[in-house]
Image (cartoon, rainbow, N blue to C red):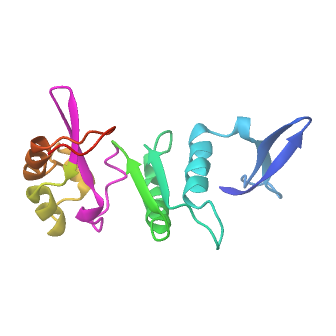
Amino acid sequence: MVHGLERKQIGPMETLEFRQEMAAAKHPSRFLAQNMSDGTLRALGVLTALFQGNCDYAPSLVGIEEPETAMHPAASAALREALTRASTHTQVIVTSHSPDLLDDPDLSTDSLLAVISEGGETRIAPLDEASRSMMREHLFSAGELLRLNQLAPDATVLALQSQSQADLFGEYQP
């Protein structure tokens, strides 16, 4: 229902003014940012991060942690579409615990990494073959697998990671 926004100067400060359609109103109502929901403001921030730049410049990487925070679950499909569209011109990295955000049967298994925490150590790897197979055959979406606690990292890749440890502040140690 938000149809626009603009920067508004209030004394020495600036804010945003949103225009929103209201039932039976002849003209859109105007609301300052402080009167908008956290979800609306967060969505604006996510969209700004994804689509910043212009036709000559776009950032090479945008990272967003839990972009669905404070948004209604029904907005997940629109959020996913924005993330996908932005990824055509910028590398987008997203962390999320939201099955709703992953509920897309066409989501590529190559675009997902799974995380596991064992013994106080967090590790990340591509999806295991069982997860990939279920998604490729459209038996389950990534979101459904996450709800079932069946979205897992590839054990082979995790084993290879255990064989070598990178020294972040020195040379690589095999």
Q: Residue at x 11, y 64 (%)?
A: 133
Q: Residue 111 falls in which quadrant of the image?
A: bottom left
**Residue at (65% x, 55% y) in the render:** 1
Relative to 71, say whether 109 is above or below: below
Direction from residue 68 to residue 48 in the image, left or right: right
Q: Nearer the viewer, residue 158 or 18?
A: 158
Residue 72 seen from this side? yes
- The front one of 150 and 117 is 117
Of 39 and 174, which appears nearest the observer?
A: 174
Residues shaded magenta: 98-124
Eyeballing the image, is 84 above or below 31?
Answer: below
Judged from this view, the residue extending furthest toward the front is 171
* Horizontal side of residue 57 vs 173, given as left or right: right
User: Which residue lies most toward the right here?
Assistant: 11
Kindly identify the residue that appears in the image at 90 percent across and 35 percent down: 12
Q: Is residue 58 left or right of residue 8?
A: left
- Count numbered badges in the picture: 0
> Does 41 lie within the magenta span?
no
Q: Is residue 78 left or right of residue 162?
A: right
Q: What is the x, y in percent for residue 137?
A: 14, 69
Q: Position of residue 30 (x, y in %)?
A: 80, 47
Q: Which residue ends up furthest to the top in the rendered image?
A: 120
Percent x, y of residue 162: 11, 41
Please indicate, yes or no, whether residue 67 appears anywhere in the rendered image: no
Q: Write the residue at 23% across / 52% down.
A: 144
Q: Quadrant of the C terminus?
A: top left
- Residue 73 picture location, percent across and down: 43, 47
Q: Residue furthest bottom?
A: 55
**Closest to the observer, 12 or 72:** 12
